[in-house]
Structures are given as structure tokens and as C-alpha cells.
Amino acid sequence: MRTLKIAAISSLIAASSAMAGGPVAANNDTQFGVGFLYGMGFGSASPALSVDAIFSNLEAGVNTSIANAKTGDADSVTAYGVGGYFGMRQSLGQAFYGSLGVSGDIAFTSVSGAPNPYLVGAYAGLNFKPGNNFQIFARLMPYAYSSDDVKGGTRGHQFFSTGSVGINYFFS
């Protein structure tokens, strides 16, 4: 467990060091857009819709999702998720960007009196933006803290178990 923690911290430090001396992002315009992503968290994978913004060297966004999960006793739980992220973004070369930041999600469940699980952690991302309007991205959370998953399972520290992939359309 300690080795895994050291590996997660080392990967974040290495990624931030590599990006610190990188070139400034070529696109200095602020852009707002919408997106579709497929995320893994709270013990299940689910699609989500997002509203995103990119600035010269920053990125931010919020997303929402609805997912159904089966609990141990076969009851169905509907989870309404809301999440967000904020991070720095650097050009890694033509059309590629790296990002580091913080991300969080909370799920509101359909079960009366059940706790609303949340997930908070750091993310590292890779974005491919070949033109002015479209972006394909992947984000991985090397470390996250989870209060519970929707199915009532694990609680606590998670390593490399949460992330998302998606596509954005940015308005010109």
C-alpha cells in the first residue's frame, strides 16, 4: 500500500515537472463548449454530459449523469451525479495538451435515507485538439478519496481506479 502511494505521488510530481517548463498553449482564446464523456467512478461506469471551458493555460468544467446500479440484494439504485474539475493545461506539441488538476463528483441516490457518496482527487489528462472546435480527452485520477460507492461498497483511498474519456465541442 505504501509503495502504491509513493508511485501515485511520484507520477503526479513527474507529470507536473514535465509540464512546468513546457511551451505555453498555442490557443490563448477563451472557449466554452459542451461535451459527452464516459466516466468510471462510484463502483460503476456511466455516461455524462458536460459544460467545459478552456483558457490560455487552464481548463474547467461541470458534468451531470444518471446511472442505475444493482445493490447486493438486487434492488436497483438510481444515482444522479454532479461533478466538476479544474486544472492547468499545457501544450505538449502540435494539437496535444497535458493537464493536471483536481476533480470531484457527488451522487444523489434514489434510496431514502441513504448517504450521498462523493469522490475527490487529483487528475492527470491528455487532450487532442486538432482544430479549433473539437477535442478528445482522457483523464485518470492517480489518487482519489471516496466516501462510498453507489452500491454501498468500498470507502477510502483509491489508486488509479477512476477516470474518464470523452469528446468536447467548443464554440468559436
Image (cartoon, rainbow, N blue to C red):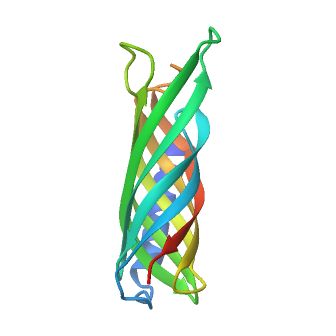
Front one among 86 and 67: 67
- 58 relative to 158 in the view: left or right: left
Give the residue drawn at x 52%, y 72%.
169
Relative height, residue 160 to residue 168 (above, below):
above
Task: Give the image location of residue 16, x and y in percent.
Answer: 43, 70
The relative height of residue 11 versus residue 99 in the rendered view (above or below) is above
Query: Residue furthest toward the top?
Result: 73
Residue 49 picture location, percent across and down: 50, 53
Vertical order, 147 against 100 (above or below): above
Residue at horizontal 56 percent and vertical 58 percent from the top: 36
For the C terminus, give its image quadrant.
bottom left
Q: Is residue 17 visible?
A: yes
The picture quadrant where one finds residue 46 is top right
Q: Is residue 77 above or below residue 3?
A: above
Splitting the image into 4 quarters, where does residue 118 fall? top left
Q: Residue at x 60, y 58 (%)?
A: 165
Looking at the image, which is closer to me, 2 or 117? 117
